[in-house]
Image (cartoon, rainbow, N blue to C red):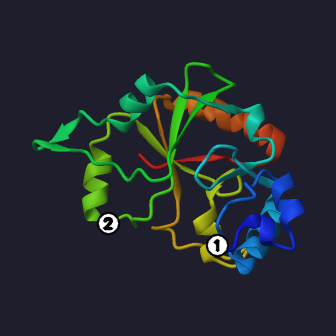
């Protein structure tokens, strides 16, 4: 199996936080390195393939709160007697450093947004935002497209499931925009 440490770019990728034992391919290493350089990204330590902006740590920290994770996953919420079953893949839980009451559960689902997904999301009791891919992304989404190409707007998106009110997200967006010239969260629901 080919890993990051086998790549001719291993030193650069490891410096960007990529685990040296991450399974990949020579082509993927090239794409990921180019993407990280172009958009100032790095690998999120301890994640399952999450890339974040190099200044991500100024705004968020990883949280291990199982209570908050369970709350935002809404595992106990039912629609017509069935679980909401959110599109949760490759999740991370973050606590805001801008507003310490805010938690964000991110997901990089493989499912496109179909009518069934919209129905489930509409019943989600908290807010959902799309995340700008130059702030948080998933390596498989990057690897699927040449660097700089537009993505299908109904797939390959990263979502933020959050307990934040709209005003709180606007404040977080403003702080990050003032630093990075990027609106990170776009309202989804």
Q: Quadrant of residue 82?
A: top left
In the rendered image, which residue does mark 2 sit on? Answer: 114
Q: Position of residue 116 (x, y in %)?
A: 25, 60
Q: Position of residue 105 (x, y in %)?
A: 50, 39
The residue located at (38%, 34%) in the rendering is: 126
Q: Is residue 160 above or below residue 151?
A: above
- Tell me the tag on residue 170: none
130 with respect to 51 (left or right): left
User: Between residues 117 and 48, which one lies in front from this camera angle?
Assistant: 48
Alpha-carbon distance for marks 1 and 2? Answer: 23 Å
User: Between residues 16 and 88, which one lies in front from this camera angle?
Assistant: 16
> Quarter of the image containing the N terminus?
bottom right
Q: Position of residue 171 (x, y in %)?
A: 65, 30
User: How many marks can you see?
Assistant: 2
User: Between residues 186 and 100, which one lies in front from this camera angle?
Assistant: 100
The residue located at (58%, 72%) in the rendering is: 151
Answer with mark 1 or mark 2, whichever residue precedes in sequence: 2
In the rendered image, which residue does mark 1 sit on? Answer: 143
Q: Position of residue 58 (x, y in %)?
A: 78, 32
Residue at the far left in the pictured view: 81
**Mark 1 surroundings within 10 Å by alpha-carbon count, few (fewer than 14), some (14 through 19), many (20 or more):** some
Q: Is residue 26 above or below residue 137?
A: below
Mark 1 or mark 2: which is in front? 1
């Amino acid at each position: 199996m080919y890993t990051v440490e086998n790549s001719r770019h291993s030193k650069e990728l490891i410096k960007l936080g990529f685990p040296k034992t991450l399974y990949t391919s020579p082509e993927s290493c090239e794409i990921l390195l180019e993407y990280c350089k172009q958009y100032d990204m790095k690998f999120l330590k301890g994640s399952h393939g999450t890339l974040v902006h190099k200044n991500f740590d100024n705004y968020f920290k990883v949280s291990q709160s199982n209570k908050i994770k369970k709350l935002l996953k809404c595992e106990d919420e039912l629609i017509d007697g069935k679980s909401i079953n959110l599109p949760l893949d490759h999740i991370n839980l973050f606590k805001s450093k801008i507003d310490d009451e805010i938690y964000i559960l991110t997901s990089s689902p493989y499912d496109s947004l179909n009518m069934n997904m919209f129905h489930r999301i509409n019943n989600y009791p908290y807010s959902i935002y799309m995340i700008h891919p130059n702030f948080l992304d998933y390596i498989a989404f990057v690897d699927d497209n040449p660097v700089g190409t537009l993505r299908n707007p109904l797939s390959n998106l990263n979502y933020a499931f959050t307990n934040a009110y709209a005003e709180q997200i606007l404040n977080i967006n403003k702080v990050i925009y003032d630093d990075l010239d990027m609106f990170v969260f776009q309202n989804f629901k």
